[in-house]
Image (spheres, rainbow, N blue to C red):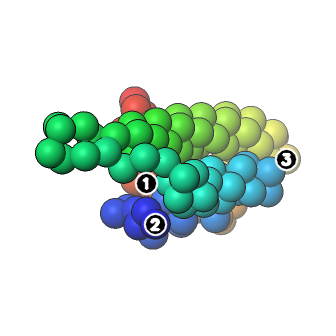
Amino acid sequence: HIDLVEREVLRDTIAALLLEEWKNDMDREIEAINQSLSTTFAGDEFYDDEGEKAEAVRRWIRSVLHKIVLYKAQHHSYLNEAATTLQLALPQDIVIKDVLPFLELPSYTFEGEE
């Protein structure tokens, strides 16, 4: 079983994503490692063999990070598009003060983000 160090940060970010499809995909991705590790060879310290589990965890971490960075970028793109549209219909101060804060993601930056 894998416990994420930044689990709450990741969960908060996932919960704030715009599309349910993205949230479901991230939940599946996070849970996938626990299923695959049960059938993966652990390695042997005596032979300096780190085994397949370590590599599986590294691949999984890269995959989770890649997806969350991708979904955050798409989220920001949609948010910018929505803000532009709303600013045409509403005063800018209302959009900035009252609308955008509800749509923004947590400010945490994941590895691989700019």
Q: Secondary structure at mark 1?
A: loop
The residue indicated by pointer 3 is 89
**Residue 67 coordinates in the image, percent (x, y):** 59, 39
**Residue 69 coordinates in the image, percent (x, y):** 53, 38
The residue indicated by pointer 2 is 1
Q: Nearer the viewer, residue 83 or 67?
A: 67
- Residue 46: image quadrant is top left
**Residue 114 coordinates in the image, percent (x, y):** 40, 30
* Residue at image point 54% right, 65% down: 11
Q: Counting residues from the N terminus, which is met first, the one under dot 1 or under dot 3?
A: 3
Q: Is residue 8 left or right of residue 26?
A: left
Q: Which mark is residue 107?
A: 1
- Direction right: furthest residue: 89
- Direction front: furthest residue: 46
Is residue 76 placed above or below 35 in the rendered structure? above
Q: Secondary structure at mark 3?
A: helix
- Residue 27: image quadrant is bottom right
Q: Is residue 42 visible?
A: yes
Q: Is residue 13 visible?
A: no
Q: Nearer the viewer, residue 23 or 54?
A: 54
Q: Nearer the viewer, residue 58 or 7?
A: 58
* Residue at image point 45% right, 41% down: 56
Q: CA distance from mark 2 to mark 1?
A: 28 Å
